[in-house]
Structure formats: structure tokens, C-alpha cells
Amino acid sequence: MVRGETQQDPLNAFITLAEIPPRAPGRLSGITVAVKDNISTRGVETTCGSRILSGYVPPYDAHVVDLIRNEGALIPGKTNMDEFGMGSSTENSGFGPARNPRDPERVTGGSSGGSAAAVASGMARMALGTDTGGSIRCPAAFCGIVGLKPTYGRISRYGLVAYANSLEQIGPMALSVADCSLLMEVISRFDARDATMQDRPYLPRLDGDIRGMRIGVPAEFFGEGVDPAVADRVRKAISVLEGLGAAIVECAMPSMEYALAAYYVTCTSEASSNLARFDGVRYGPASDYKKPWHEAFQEVRMQHFGPEVRRRILIGTFALSAGYYGKYYGKAQVAREHVREDYSRLFQEVDLLAGPTMPTVAWKIGEKSDPLSMYLADILTVPANLAGVPAASVPCGTVQGLPVGLQLTGRAFEDELVMNAAYAYEQGVKA
Ligand code: GLN
């Protein structure tokens, strides 16, 4: 087992290097698929990027791991991530930050930063990530690869360690849209063990024909905080889609004003509950059982959770507490409903929405020191999670040598359409 920057893994893309062999030949034979470290792998340590889970070895495989191994995939290891998925840069990993293959002084984005770095550097052909508020799309954009956050309920979360379960999905990451689509196809098989899953497998349709497709461009996607050079790149990409026959429709998404706040109240509330199980009894370093239970739990959690995780547990516990519940959690759910309504209204007029994935390019490691500035980076990715709709990031050129992502968002269960538009763009710029 290897950890940190090593000769084998100079970008610190992996927390654990381990060759997990395929179980049967199939559509992924001969293909390496790196797996994010919050997805359970039987017999192989699964840390979620947290010291509190170091040494934890799951007794079973996640459903998606079963599926890829049964299709011939070789898993080269478990990828680095922000602790429990909490972050947008992979700097919050308990095992050191991952480095961006395009510029090792810069972040990979997060929280699936190790997965993106592994694919972008060629250490793996494909990867699985998870996306609660942008964690697949952000690192895909920053590292110049393709990533899809599937429709909520399309991929089984069985074996995924929960951070904010009403928001998150496992999804594919790869260099090309076709590879990303293939991995999506393999992992979308029904599993009754996730009660939120629907039996609607992804059936790829990559013909690149987007003639007549209506693509909405909400003004808010180019609002305050979006780097003008990034905005310019993305507008050029949208005009490529127009050149391919899509109709571009300027529109508005007023609920964007509340989306980030609604997201952070919801995800911290869910996290405070989901992470209550890490108390040194069943998982993680053992508590001192001689002490009163609350002291023992407090000690283990203080010592082994990182600062961002502790901050979020505190915020979430506060937001859910009697007397504040209505003011914070309740209001966040109202705002979430507004986001859903905005999408439903827009999707009556257009088939897709387009805009930048991230407001900026990858920043330097250590550059963002206050948590709020990191949260603000998620403004363009969280709305899709609040509404459960599918969204992909596809590379659309560079700004000062650093990759920019074009985000395409579609109606629920129209992941196929999203990927086809991404494919049209990818092939369109190649031609
Ligand atoms: N950056 C967001 C957060 O910190 C999203 C992370 C994710 O999608 N897991 O919550």
C-alpha cells in the first residue's frame, strides 16, 4: 500500500494503489477504472479521504464495483478526495492534496480530484467519482476531462459512504464522451438495495445529431464571480453547438440567487446525521471505553475528523436544532423547490441548458484559505444536485493553458441527450 506523492503516483491521485482484478470478461475488458475512495471495495481499504476511516476494510463491494468487475474492468486503486466529499479542490483530503496534471502547483478540483487526475494523467482510462454538489464536474473541468453527474436515482448508491444522500450520485469520468458514456451504461443497472433507484438503465445514443435541439443559456450562469475569460471560452463553445444546428435561447434562472445557500444548509444538515456513525465504536480508531461515552466520542471525532468536516457537522447540527430548523433547514427546502420549479419551467421551452461548469480555472494549491470562497466556487454546479437533474462537463479549450469545462444540463432521465450534445460538441471541435 502506497500513500502520498511517490514515484508511482507523483500527483497523489490515489490513496491506495491496489490491483483489484476483474471477475469476468466483458465490455470493460482491458480497461482500467479507478474508483473514488468513498465507494466500498471488498477487502481493500476505503477511507473516504478521512483519517477516521484509515484501516477500514469493507466486507462487500458497492453495486457499481460489482458491475464494473463483472464487465472486465481492472481497478488500479482508490482515488484521493476531499474528506467525505467535502470540498472543491481535494485539498481537504486527510492524505494530502492531489495535484493537477496540467500544472502540479494547482488543484485538481474536487472532491473527486484523484479520479480526475488519474484519468487526465493516463494512470487509469476511466474513473468513478461521486457528485453531491459538483464533485465530478468540477475536477473534470479543472483537469480537462469529461464527467457526468447522472440523474438522481439512476445509479445505485449501495456501498457508497453517504455524505448528503438526497443530493449525491455516483458517476463516470473519462477522457472522451464515448468512454464516459460506456462506463455510464455499465453502472446504470438496477439494484433493489438502493430504495431511491429507478429501473431506467442508460441507453447511449451518441450520433452527434443536435439539429433542432433547443439550448437555453441562463444569464445567471454568466453572473458575478465568473471569470470573463472563462465566460468568453464557454460562449464560443455554445456558438459551436449553434453551428451544429442547435437553437440557442437566452433565458433566466432567478432561483440561482438562493441555490448555493440552500445547498450548503441541506448538505451540512444531512452530513451531521450521516457522519454520526463515526464514533470510534464500529468504525475508525477505537474510543477510550473507560471514559464517559460522550467524552470518548468527542475525543475520537476531534482527533480524526479534519477541520472542514468538523465545521460542517457543527453547521448542520445547528441548522437542524429545535428552534432553528424552520429558519434554516425548512427555508432551504423551500429554496430547493424554487430551483426545481425553475428547471421544470425552463425545460418546457428548451431541451438543455448550457454554461460554464466552474466560474474560474483551477487555482493554486493553498490559494483559497477561507471556506466561503471555496463554497462560492460551487455556484454553477449545485443547482443540478438540488433538482436531481443530469449534468455533464465537457472540455472546451483553455484559458492561460488551463482547462475550461462546458456544462450541459438536461431533464431528469435524459442523461442520453446530455451526453449526445457533449459528443456533438467534442466531435464538432475535432472536425
Ligand atoms: N464542493 C461541494 C461540497 O463541498 C460539492 C462536493 C461534492 O459534490 N461531493 O459540498
Image (cartoon, helix red, strand yellow):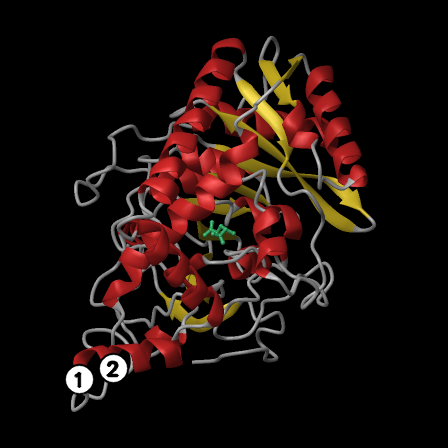
Instruction: Tell me if I can see residue 278 in this picture.
Output: yes
> Does 180 sit above or below residue 40?
above
Of residues 338 and 175, the one nearer the viewer is: 338
Count every numbered label the image shows and give the total. 2
Residue 72 in view (yes/no): no
Taking the view exactly as shown, the residue that stands out farthest to the bottom is 290
In this rendering, would 364 be left or right of 77?
right
Find out whether the residues at labels 1 and 2 contact each other: C-beta distance under 8 Å.
yes
Instruction: Using the numbered discs, state the Cα–Cα distance from disc 1 to disc 2 in whole angstroms.
Output: 6 Å
User: Where residue 394 sits in the image (x, y, percent)?
Assistant: 62, 38
Residue ID at (48%, 80%)? 2
Q: With respect to residue 317, does 297 lie above or below?
A: below
Q: Is mark 1 within 8 Å of ligand 1?
A: no
Residue 398 in percent (x, y) is at: 77, 44
User: Can you identify the residue that label 1 sits on?
Assistant: 292
Ligand 1 closer than 8 Å to label 2 CB: no
Q: Residue at x 37, y 61 (%)?
A: 313
Q: Secondary structure at mark 2?
A: helix
Which residue position is annotated with label 2? 295
User: Which residue is pictured at 57% across the width and 66% down the height?
Assistant: 91
In front here: 336 or 365? 336
Q: Is 316 drawn above or below residue 91 in the view shown?
A: above
Callout 2 environment at 10 Å: few (<14), some (14 to 19), or many (20+)?
Answer: some
The kind of residue on which mark 2 rests is: Glu
**Quarter the N terminus occupies:** bottom left
Which residue lies most toward the right here?
Answer: 400
Pick the residue in front: 184 or 287. Answer: 287
Q: What amino acid is found at the position of numbered circle 1 in the picture?
A: Pro
309 left or right of 370 in image: left
